Image: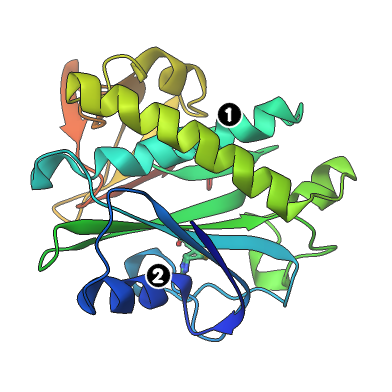
Amino acid sequence: MIINLDEIDSTNEYLKRMSNDGYNSDEMLVVTAQYQTAGKGRRGRSWVTEPGTALMFSVLLKPRLKLDDCSMLTLVMALAVKRSLSDMDIEAMIKWPNDIVLNKKKICGILTEAIAETGQMIIGVGINTNQESMPEDLSLSATSILMETDDCIDHDSLLDNIIYHLEKLTQSVYDTGDLSLLRKEYEDSLVSMNTAVTVLDPAGEYDGICKGIDDRGQLIVEHEKKETRVYAGEVSVRGIYGYV
Ligand code: BTN
C-alpha cells in the first residue's frame, strides 16, 4: 500500500507513529511526501528539499531477519534504487553503505530506523531528482538527476520500480539469511571498490583499500596488510580526496 502526503514532518516519523499505534502487516507500507517540515538525515542531520523537487518516501516492513541482521536491508534498499535508475539508463554507483552517487556526487540518502518495540523497521529514502541547483554548501558533494542528465524524473514510476526491486531483493536476503546472492552486484556498484578510502573510526582514522563487502554487508578494508571489517553503525568511510 502507498500513502501519498502533501506535507508531513518526516515520512520516517509518520511510519514510526503508525507502527507504535499498532499498524502491523506482513506487506510493506510506503508513505511519500511532497514536502517534509522536519526531514531527517543520518547522524542527526536534517534533510531539507524544496516542495516536489525530490522523491522522498519511507517503507515500513517487518524484517524476517534477526535484529542484528536488519542493517543489511539498508544496503538492499541502495541496490533497489541503483537497479531502478539503471532501468532508466542512469548508471549511478553506491557509496557504502547506502548513499547513491552520480558523477561522484550524492543524489540519494537512506535513513534506516529499527523500532524495537514492534519488531518493525523503517527505511527512508530521499532522492534528488528534479532540483535545478543545489544549495551552495552542498554543491561540491551533492547533485540531482536533472542536473546531471537533463532528465526530468516521474516520481510515481520511479517509486513503483524501486518497490518492485526492493521486494525481489529482500526475498533473496530472507532465502539465504544474508547478502551472499547480492554481494557481487553490490560490489560491482561500489564507487570505492579497490580504491583508497579513509575510515572515520571514532577510535582513530585510518586509510586503506576498499576490498568489497562480506556476506553481512560490512565493508572490507585492507589496512597495513590486514583485512579489517567496518560496521556501518560505528563509522563512515570516504575517499581519501573527498566525499567519494
Ligand atoms: C542521509 O543522511 O543521507 C539520509 C537521508 C534520508 C532522507 C529521507 S527523505 C524521506 C525519509 N524521511 C526522512 O525524514 N528522512 C528520509
* 5 lies left or right of 63: right
Q: Is residue 92 visible?
A: no
Image spot of residue 72 (x, y percent): 26, 37
The amino acid beneath tag 2 is Asn
Q: Element at badge 1? A: helix
Residue on which disc 2 sits: 12
Q: Residue at x 14, y 58 (%)?
A: 119
Task: Depth check: give the residue in front, 82 or 213.
Answer: 82
Judge left or right: residue 52 versus residue 221: right
- Residue 205 image point, x, y percent: 25, 47
The quadrant holding residue 182 is top left
| Alpha carbon distance from label 1 to label 2 | 23 Å
Query: Residue 23: horizontal and vertical position, in percent?
Result: 27, 69
Please tell me which of labels 1 and 2 falls first in the chain. Answer: 2
For image coordinates 73% across by 71% down, the residue present is: 136
Q: Nearer the viewer, residue 184 or 15?
A: 15
Tell me, for residue 197, which label it has, or none: none
Quarter of the image for residue 54 reads: bottom right
Q: Residue 83: which numbered mark, if any?
A: 1
Viewer-nearest residue: 84 or 184: 84
Q: For the residue with label 2, is its CB less than 8 Å from the closest atom of ligand 1?
A: yes
Q: Is residue 135 above or below residue 146?
A: below
Task: Give left or right: position of 102 versus 187.
Answer: right
Picture residue at 53% right of the left edge, 47% below the top: 243
- Residue at image coords 69%, 26%: 87
Other-residue count near label 1 (Cα within 10 Å), few / some / many at <14 / 14–19 / ≥20: many
The answer as to whether callout 1 falls within 8 Å of ligand 1 is: no
